[in-house]
Image (tube, helix red, strand yellow):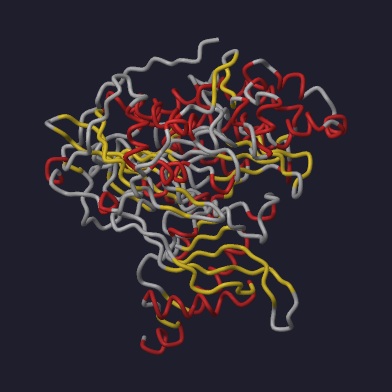
Amino acid sequence: MSSSLSVQFLSPPLSSALPCCKQTRLAAATTPLAPVSTDVEAARLEPRVEERDGYWVLKEKFRGGINVQEKVKIQKEPMKLFMENGIEELAKISFEELEKSKDSKDDIDVRLKWLGLFHRRKSHYGRFMMRLKLPNGVTTSAQTKYLASVIRKYGEDGCADVTTRQNWQIRGVVLPDVPEILKGLAEVGLTSLQSGMDNVRNPVGNPLAGIDPDEIVDTRPYTNLLSQYITANSLGNPTVTNLPRKWNVCVVGSHDLFEHPHINDLAYMPATKDGRFGFNLLVGGFFSPKRCAEAVPLDAWVSADDVIPLCKAVLEAYRDLGTRGNRQKTRMMWLIDELGIEGFRAEVAKRMPFQELERASSEDLVQKQWERRDYVGVHPQKQEGLSYVGLHIPVGRLQANDMDELARLADEYGTGELRLTVEQNIIIPNVENSKLEALHKEPLLKNRFSPEPSILMRGLVACTGNQFCGQAIIETKARALKVTEEVERHVAVTRPVRMHWTGCPNTCAQVQVADIGFMGCMARDENGKPCEGADVFLGGRIGSDSHLGHVYKKSVPCKDLVPLVVDILVKHFGAVPREREEGED
């Protein structure tokens, strides 16, 4: 089995708007670096993993004090379920039989995540969520229709979500169907491989890539190549499947920073150097229940040709040296803290093809002073006569019929393409201007997915919540919609306010980057009885002045959130009470 992947990349042309922003710098590039460590012992830099029979495993000498998930990986290589057809045999065994053995139970609850399959033991027993790989959030009508056909057969158990990484997740899947679903995915050019557990998540890029009049560079070739490398063209790449924890990557192509670089483990920031196009690098951004960290500059620049070698070097440094004990301290930033930014940089450099890494360029291409645009609604493309139409998908939830209708609209009004966004919305690109009026009259846009949602609804994001996720403490999606509707009856807002809801401290909905965030918790009501509640966050920012929000108020009962949000909107976001607004009119 070959575990290497050779790639070649040609630099795409830059946008014509690029020269005007050469002199600007990204604010995140001035973030203080992690402290430089000077006493890292040579023994600490010994790789902790080794290759055995084509797979990478933890060495015997480093197995003391490892976490439960690492033990599961050692007991049986998860990638064999895909690369050696283990899923075929697993799918033939009844769920009851699988539950009797610890080994097969670990397959269900842990190893299948390497195939993008998440068993919903607590909330949806016997059913799986399947997460796909969808680089840059670009999908086709054929792919969308296929996914609709999969979830339709599961009736009320089947639905789909747009995720905060421009991705599809489908729900209701049962194990016996998985081999056939995997074949169907391959036929339409999709894969679910390596989308969960200790793997690289979906590569995020500019949702307007290739159609944006103001884009810096088209991110699609880069995100596609990253996905191809990470999964070895959907065949499985075991060189990067045994990481200490999950790992996120994005490629920035917009001044708006739609890609949220500061919360990724690796972010490629467009920059020129000596007349060459390439990227400065940010590393280490992540969220977890115990710690949230913004990405810091690696003080490194790579040419467009080295996007994949750099990604490979960073992943191998993390794979080789990352700690595998307490799962709350195994994300890549913990390794950066331990080695110091220069020590980590040196480890990345030694894994580059020529053991060299250029220092960062001063020619960042992202404009620092840039008002973040709204892609929801109708907007002209760089291609004359064409527009893209951003549709609001309430908290990212779709049913099979919705997906079929979106596919039809993409075919009838566009070029059969859809774009998913990190705010859980969907864009139809390449719509001829002469067709815009007819598209606006479509029932789906009038009744379900409006291109003109209210200000608060258009900025609403919510994780799965306890409807399907066993880790979530509260229900999120329906509650987020209900609270927002009630708040809108009390106040009018005149500027965008992004509200994010997450069901637990894992913060899948990224409440720390929201203007107002809600993190599920248990609270007590006025009688002292336990009830569903939320810790309320305030002040998160995205864009060139990005920073994380802070806890504004802890353990608020969910039934008390509406008046609190109304108060926050009036005090901090200039909202006007409806009674006063009507009186002034």
Residue 15 versus residue 190 in the image, above or below: below
Total marks placed: 0
Of residues 576 and 104, the one nearer the viewer is: 104
The answer to whether residue 429 of the structure is visible from this angle is yes
Residue at the image position 41 percent from the left and 28 percent from the top: 226
Q: Assign the N terminus to one quadrant of the image.
A: top right
Residue farthest top in this picture: 1
Quadrant assignment, res 279 = top left
User: What percent of the width, then of the height, locates residue 169?
Assistant: 59, 40
Q: For this view, does 89 lie left or right of residue 299?
A: right
32 on left or right of 468: left
Above or below — where is 495 with respect to 377? below
Q: Position of residue 426 (x, y in %)?
A: 46, 45
Q: Quadrant of the C terminus?
A: bottom left
Seen in the picture, residue 46 relative to 377 is either above or below; the reply is above
Which sits in the foreground, 555 or 207? 555
Residue 358 occupies which quadrant of the picture? top left
The residue drawn where x is 36% and y is 31% is: 348
> In the shown orientation, is residue 520 left or right of residue 497?
right
Which residue is pictured at 31% across the width and 41% down the height? 298
Q: Which quadrant of the view contains residue 235?
A: top right
**Residue 134 on image: x %, y %:** 48, 33
Tell me if I can see residue 455 in this picture.
no
The percent coordinates of residue 10 (x first, y second) are: 26, 21
